[in-house]
Image (tube, rainbow, N blue to C red):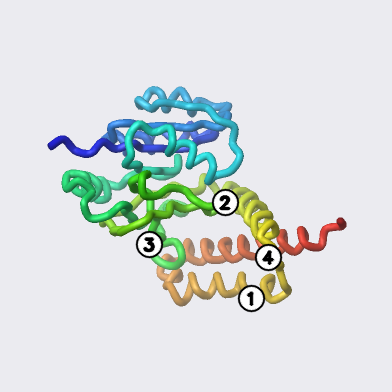
């Protein structure tokens, strides 16, 4: 019996420096779909060189963009990556084995994501294993709901965990990380505000502290050395930004 065909999906915008490695790691898939939202660099050209079918669509939210990509795929089994991610060797072997077995164990598969941070992969704290569900049967799941930020796949039925890591080349620099967190914090604050959530002083004071303590001490982020310290501290600042921005939204003049 022929293996179940697999469609890989990626959304992009100005990822010329990273998209090649991402798509190379997806070469074992029968199809690669790239949905680009107006790149001004060579992202689309590089994607085509790697055999991807490239579509263009204006960006109106992460969840919506990813759902669109999934719906354009030719096959029902989807492997979804961000442009700064790539499939590690052990994970690829796990995916190939699950496919050879007809994906009989589940309707979705999750796996650990390892983030490279200033030259080394973080292996502790909030950064790892950071399991994500990215391999799924779209007939039983997908990017559901209304939240456009920190979106994730939901699946009806069994979910299994595969061995191996999804390698995450997350940040080009500290400035890149801080700028990304600022965008995410604003989008998340807007989502919470639309849902009727309110920020209180305790959120501004305690939530960032809890994020730091949980990741750095309770989950062993300190074992990653100075990288673990910096990562935990910047994470805590993201949480503080989110609640500050929510506070400003709820106190804005009507």
Q: Nearer the viewer, residue 208 or 151?
A: 151
**2 or 1: tag closer to the N-terminus:** 2
Marker disc for residue 197: 4
Q: CA distance from mark 1 to mark 3?
A: 25 Å
Q: Which residue is mark 2?
A: 146
> Which quarter shows the N terminus?
top left
Q: Classify mark 2: helix, strand or loop.
A: loop
N-term-proximal mark, 1 vs 3 = 3
Q: In whole angstroms, how far apart are the C-alphas of marks 4 and 3?
A: 29 Å
Mark before the other along the chain sequence, 1 or 4 = 4
Q: Is residue 70 visible?
A: yes
* Contact (Cβ within 8 Å) of mark 4 with mark 2: no
Front disc: 1 or 4? 4
- Separation of disc 3 and disc 2 at Cα? 26 Å
Comparing 52 with 50, the one in front is 52
Q: Give the image location of residue 141, x and y in percent.
A: 39, 49
Badge 1 vs badge 3, beta-carbon distance below 8 Å: no
Query: Which is closer to the viewer, label 4 or label 3?
Result: 4
Q: Quadrant of the C terminus?
A: bottom right
Q: Earlier in the sequence, mark 3 or mark 2?
A: 3
Q: CA distance from mark 1 to mark 4?
A: 17 Å
Q: Residues under labels 2 and 1: Cα distance?
A: 28 Å
Q: Quadrant of residue 197?
A: bottom right
For mark 3, what is the residue?
129
Tell me which residue sits at (40%, 55%) in the image.
Answer: 132
Label 1: which residue? 206
| Disc 2 versus disc 1: nearer the observer | 2
User: Which residue, as the protein is rendered here, is positioned at the far right?
Assistant: 253
Residue 41 vs 116, above or below: the answer is above
**Which residue is at a point 64% across and 76% down the rendered structure image?**
206
């Amino acid at each position: 019996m022929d293996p179940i065909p697999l469609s890989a999906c990626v959304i992009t915008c100005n990822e010329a420096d990273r998209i090649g490695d991402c798509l190379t790691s997806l070469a074992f898939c029968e199809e690669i779909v790239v949905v680009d939202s107006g790149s001004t660099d060579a992202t689309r050209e590089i994607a085509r060189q790697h055999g991807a079918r490239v579509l263009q669509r204006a960006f109106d939210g992460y969840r919506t963009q990813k759902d669109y990509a999934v719906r354009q795929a030719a096959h029902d089994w989807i492997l979804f990556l961000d442009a700064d991610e790539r499939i590690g060797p052990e994970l690829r072997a796990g995916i190939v084995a699950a496919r050879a077995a007809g994906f009989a164990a589940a309707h979705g598969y999750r796996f650990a994501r390892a983030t490279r941070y200033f030259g080394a992969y973080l292996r502790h704290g909030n950064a790892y294993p950071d399991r994500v569900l990215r391999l799924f049967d779209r007939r039983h799941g997908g990017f559901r709901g209304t939240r456009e930020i920190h979106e994730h796949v939901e699946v009806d039925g069994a979910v299994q965990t595969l061995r191996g890591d999804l390698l995450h080349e997350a940040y080009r620099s500290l400035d890149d990380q801080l700028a990304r967190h600022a965008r995410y914090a604003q989008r998340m604050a807007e989502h919470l505000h639309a849902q009727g959530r309110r920020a209180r002083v305790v959120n501004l004071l305690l939530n960032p502290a809890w994020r730091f303590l949980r990741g750095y001490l309770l989950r062993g982020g300190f074992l990653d050395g100075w990288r673990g310290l910096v990562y935990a501290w910047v994470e805590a600042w993201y949480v503080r930004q989110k609640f500050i921005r929510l506070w400003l939204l709820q106190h804005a003049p009507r």
